[in-house]
Image: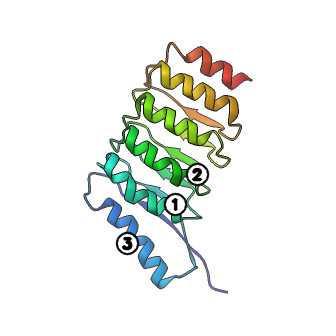
């Protein structure tokens, strides 16, 4: 029996070929290691993905059955990119989703919360510094009232003062 290679891909910075690095890693593994590889972590922190960069990434995420951690901190992702990520996120076994420092706003957070309502794998969710207002806070409170899988939720540096009681109440029930 051959050993399985567990891969963790970290591509930080504003490299224009970040998504190409992810695709190349998967292609090399598929060609040379066939079913003997597992891609566990993709961390593209501080890459300039923007909304348009999410679609190619979604193909990689959706095709992976071993991806556990997705780090997209400070990637300038907005509501459209968040909506693109939703289907891919729910197709796998992702345990941790890090999205701090983007511009999800209420529209992106609402879309994300809607798709995570039925998600049973994500336990750690970081939505810090995403310009989330009271409307987004209400979507988060609704998510927490139906999703019992999320164990850790980071919401620092947002505009949630008006919705904080709703979120706290959802956490306690």
Q: Mark 2: give few (<14), some (14-19) or many (20+) Cα within 10 Å.
A: some
Q: Which residue is mark 3?
A: 24
Q: Mark 3: give few (<14), some (14-19) or many (20+) Cα within 10 Å.
A: few
Q: Residue at x 49, y 52 (%)?
A: 70
Q: Secondary structure at mark 2?
A: helix
Name above or below for residue 93 compared with residue 165: below
* The disc label shown at residue 62, or none: 1
Quadrant for the N terminus in the image? bottom right
Q: CA distance from mark 2 to mark 3?
A: 23 Å
Q: Residue furthest bottom?
A: 1
Q: Mark 1: give few (<14), some (14-19) or many (20+) Cα within 10 Å.
A: some
Q: Residue at x 37, y 37 (%)?
A: 102
Q: Residue furthest right?
A: 173
Task: Determine whether label 1 and label 2 are within 8 Å by CB.
Answer: no
Q: Nearer the viewer, residue 104 or 129?
A: 104
Q: CA distance from mark 1 to mark 3?
A: 16 Å
The first of marks 2 and 3 along the sequence is: 3
Name above or below for residue 47 compared with residue 129: below
Q: Which residue is mark 2?
A: 90
Q: Residue at x 59, y 64 (%)?
A: 65
Task: Determine whether label 1 and label 3 are within 8 Å by CB.
Answer: no
Instruction: State left or right for residue 142 relative to residue 22.
Output: right
The first of marks 1 and 3 along the sequence is: 3
């Amino acid at each position: 029996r051959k050993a399985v290679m567990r891969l963790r891909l970290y591509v930080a910075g504003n490299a224009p070929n970040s998504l190409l690095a992810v695709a190349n890693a998967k292609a090399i593994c598929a060609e040379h290691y066939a079913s003997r590889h597992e891609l566990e972590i993709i961390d593209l922190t501080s890459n300039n993905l923007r909304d348009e960069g999410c679609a190619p990434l979604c193909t990689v995420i959706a095709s992976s059955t071993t991806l556990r951690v997705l780090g997209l901190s400070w990637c300038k992702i907005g509501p459209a990119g968040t909506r693109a990520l939703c289907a891919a996120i729910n197709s796998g076994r992702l345990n941790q989703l890090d999205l701090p420092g983007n511009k999800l706003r209420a529209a992106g957070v609402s879309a994300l919360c809607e798709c995570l309502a039925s998600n049973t794998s994500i336990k750690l969710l970081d939505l810090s510094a995403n310009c989330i207002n009271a409307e987004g806070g209400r979507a988060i409170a609704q998510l927490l009232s139906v999703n019992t899988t999320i164990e850790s939720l980071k919401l620092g540096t947002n505009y949630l003062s008006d919705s904080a009681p709703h979120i706290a109440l959802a956490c306690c029930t």
